[in-house]
Amino acid sequence: MKRTILKTFAATGAAALLLSGCSLLDRGSETSGDANGEDGGDNPVYNEMTTWNACEVLGNLQPITDEMGIQGYGSSTSTGGEPTVSEIGNTLDPESIGCNDLIYLGSWEGLGMDGEIKVKIVPTESEDEAATAYEDRLSAAESNSAKWTDVVNQEFGDPWDKGALVAGTGSAEANWLEIVALDEQWVFHIQLNYATDYGVYGGSDPYYPFTNEELRAWFIDTYLPAVNTTINDRIAEVQ
């Protein structure tokens, strides 16, 4: 009976994501639009950052892949693949460069677990513009969380000027997480959803190599400081 319930649950969850319009990605439109957009005037840091390949800068999301045990990108049902690059001017978030895709986390007793991830770097021409971008993105994340249950709001700082994590449980028990962080004239933004751990939900041993609490702590304590260093080292080369 439990397995039957889980199969229904999985199908309902997939349909909910497709029909609700909550998908984080629209493959094929990530690099469409004016890829080079505006040239940022005379601001060398902005001009340089807008030319970056976000997946190259972020190590093709390998740290996240390892931490979450992601088995595939670009599909919710199969292994392999790599995340997709989005350039400045993309149609979904034209102010950012990003590394994004559908993710496949494996299956438990034949039930697939999937999700989506968007990891974005948002360059601006000034600290004031970056602060505004930060507040706008955090406000949108908090607004989205109004539809979730078991919501967690967590602020963090150093090495960032400021940052916040918003997480919770959405439809079909899917896990949702957004992180927004500010450092001088750029913003870092993660949007992630992933299926509930069917092992736990099915009354068995956990399938994922992490709990939600552990994943949130890893992002704040380990991943984000490393990203901050990586990006600021690159910025230093053009200042």
Image (spheres, rainbow, N blue to C red):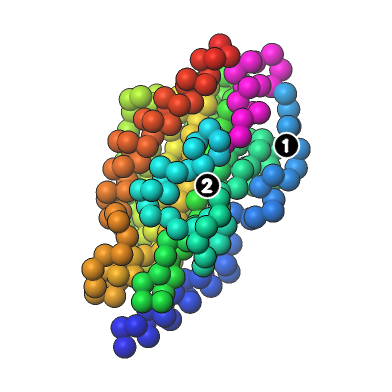
Estimate the x, y position of residue 147 in percent, counting from the top left. 44, 59
Number of numbered discs visible in the structure rendering: 2
Dot 2 alpha-carbon crowd within 10 angstroms: few under 14, some 14 to 19, many 20 or more: many
Residue drawn at 41 percent across, 74 percent down: 111
Estimate the x, y position of residue 95 in percent, counting from the top left. 63, 35
Is 173 one of the magenta-colored residues? no
Quarter assignment of residue 21: bottom right
Query: 113 above or below 4?
Result: above
Q: Residue furthest front?
A: 80
Residue stretch rendered in magenta on the structure? 40-54
What label does residue 5 carry, if any?
none
Between the C-alphas of marks 2 and 1, the distance is 18 Å
Screen quadrant of the C terminus: top right
**Residue hosting label 1:** 35
Estimate the x, y position of residue 49 in percent, counting from the top left. 60, 26
**Residue hosting label 2:** 118
Q: Nearer the viewer, residue 184 or 147?
A: 184
Query: 75 above or below 94?
Result: below
Element at label 2: strand
Quarter assignment of residue 124: top right
Residue drawn at 38 percent across, 48 percent down: 66
Mark nearer the N terminus (2 vs 1): 1
Q: Which of 175 and 65 is in front in this view?
A: 65
Screen quadrant of the N terminus: bottom left
State left or right for residue 201 relative to residue 107: left
Dot 1 alpha-carbon crowd within 10 angstroms: few under 14, some 14 to 19, many 20 or more: some
Is residue 27 visible in this depiction of the protein? yes
Query: 238 above or below 206?
Result: above
